[in-house]
Amino acid sequence: MCAMKKVHHVVRRPGNRLGDPDIEIPVAEDLVTEPGAPVREGDVSFYSREYPLEAHFVENSADREWLWSQYTESFAQWRVEHEKVDTPLVEAAAVSGDIPPHGEPDPDLDPTEHIRQKARELGFSEVGFTRYDRRYTYASKKKWVKFQHAICLAYEQEYHGTQKIPSEEAEHTHFGTYTTEGAVSLELADYIRSLGYHAQVHSHSDSSAPYIPMFINAGLGQLGANGQLLMPHFGSRGRLMMITTDAPVRYDKPVDYGINRYCDKCQVCVARCPSNALSRDKLWWRGALKNKVSYARCRPVMGRYDGCSICMKVCPVQKYGMKPVMDHYVETGEVLGKGTDELEGFTLKDKGHFGPGEKPHFDREFFEIPRGRYENWVYEDFKKRLAAGEELTKEELAEFGEAVREAVQTKRETTG
Ligand code: SF4
Ligand code: SF4
């Protein structure tokens, strides 16, 4: 066993729930890098200007359609019911920035702590303030985002349901959290309006940008090797959303939790990903230093195995929390739970259980799924069939025309 590690600094954070005592996370000397994340600001600006990002649901609309074909009948039915509840929340968020305030700003009142307190009362575990960085905004959302300050909010996804990943039950937990936070964020926005300011809700299901860089700037966590934000109480088992506002809030600062280097030592998610979709080494990507996820390898597994998320399930920070994980590292120099079936084991419905060191095999065809934008994929598929000499019936041609019309219509709606 390694000797006890020297502690470089201790991070103090509020308890998970309102009223819980603060927690103290020790960061060992050999885990120290820098607060937040390494960023090349010039690269972020360049890529934002020359190659703006686009929302996942626009960029990958082909596999979103395919996803539904992978659902069991009962889960498809459950998703339809879920959408009925969730869609009105997403629609309300979309127009929330246009609603005028219904209170008068009090020049003697600092809205920051009032908003933080209200968000905690509404059940958000993590609340932080930072500048809304427009460089990350998706192309189709650039005209939509109205206000300059970002309130970063994370709602905890229930523990026990999450440990059943991958399963339909875990997916109920995941989608259910979105509905809960979708509803309470509208309440929080209304509270901000009562203080005399505007509030625009950036919905979980209709994101305006990748939120993680702003959450890191607000001090709420650091980026894990699984591509997810690792937060103090529950790692990546928190669902992120954001409210932007013109309320004059004070910004929080990024924090070094030791995660940048801890992940280099842990690597459990990288080793356990069933399709080897996570890179072992960090690389620079659009100005961020990160372990890059291969979408092409991840998505076929996610789609076929109930959202997969094994990389979330096997993360010790998700399972035990950052404090026990860092306490253990300081005491032993080891990764809590690494090598145990409790942490690393997972079950795939048609392949059985895989303990530490064991992984399933997928053949090449497994990874062949519709890719990119739906309209492009429909067109490519059409060309392939023609080239193969397939005779297309009148009905199939009409179906193709309808698919293209729908795709063009969807594009118009999403790009305004
Ligand atoms: S969701 Fe599954 S397939 Fe995708 S990166 Fe995570 S573990 Fe790998
Ligand atoms: S499993 Fe380990 S390497 Fe992966 S994100 Fe969690 S702490 Fe980092």
Image: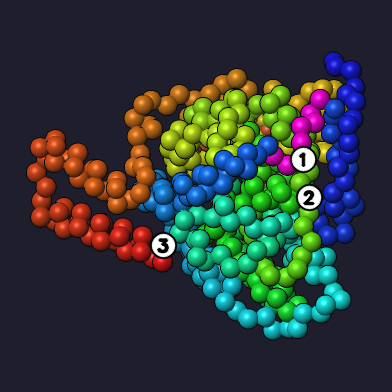
Tell me, what colour scheme is on the image? rainbow
- Is ligand 2 less than 8 Å from the beta carbon at label 1? no
Residue 28 figure quarter: top right
Question: Looking at numbered disc 1 in the image, what kind of residue is underneath it?
Answer: Pro
Label 3 – label 1 distance at C-alpha: 36 Å
Q: Residues within 10 Å of mark 1 (few under 14, many from 20)?
A: some
Question: Looking at numbered disc 2 in the image, what kind of residue is underneath it?
Answer: Lys
Label 1: which secondary element: loop
Marks 1/2 in contact by CB < 8 Å: the verdict is yes
Question: Looking at numbered disc 3 in the image, what kind of residue is underneath it?
Answer: Thr
Q: Residues within 10 Å of mark 3 (few under 14, many from 20)?
A: some
Q: Residue drawn at (53%, 44%), measured in percent from left and top?
A: 46
Tell me the residue that label 1 is attached to. Answer: 35
On screen, residue 103 above or below 177:
below
On screen, residue 263 above or below 198:
above
Which corner quadrant holds the C terminus? bottom left
- Is ligand 2 less than 8 Å from the beta carbon at label 2? no
Tell me the residue that label 2 is attached to. Answer: 253
Residue 109 lies in magenta, yes or no? no
Which is more toward the observer, 275 or 140? Answer: 140
Q: Indicate which disc, 2 or 3, sits on the residue closer to the N terminus.
A: 2
Which is more toward the observer, 188 or 111? Answer: 111
Q: How many marks?
A: 3
Residue 406: percent from left, percent from top? 29, 61
Left or right of 262: which side holds 161? left
Q: Residue drawn at (15%, 54%), measured in percent from left and top?
A: 397
Label 2 – label 3 distance at C-alpha: 33 Å
Q: Indicate which disc, 3 or 1, sits on the residue closer to the N terminus.
A: 1
Left or right of 70: which side holds 386? left
Q: Residue drawn at (46%, 47%), measured in percent from left and top?
A: 50
Q: Residue drawn at (52%, 48%), measured in percent from left and top?
A: 48
Instruction: Identify the disc placed on residue 89.
Output: none
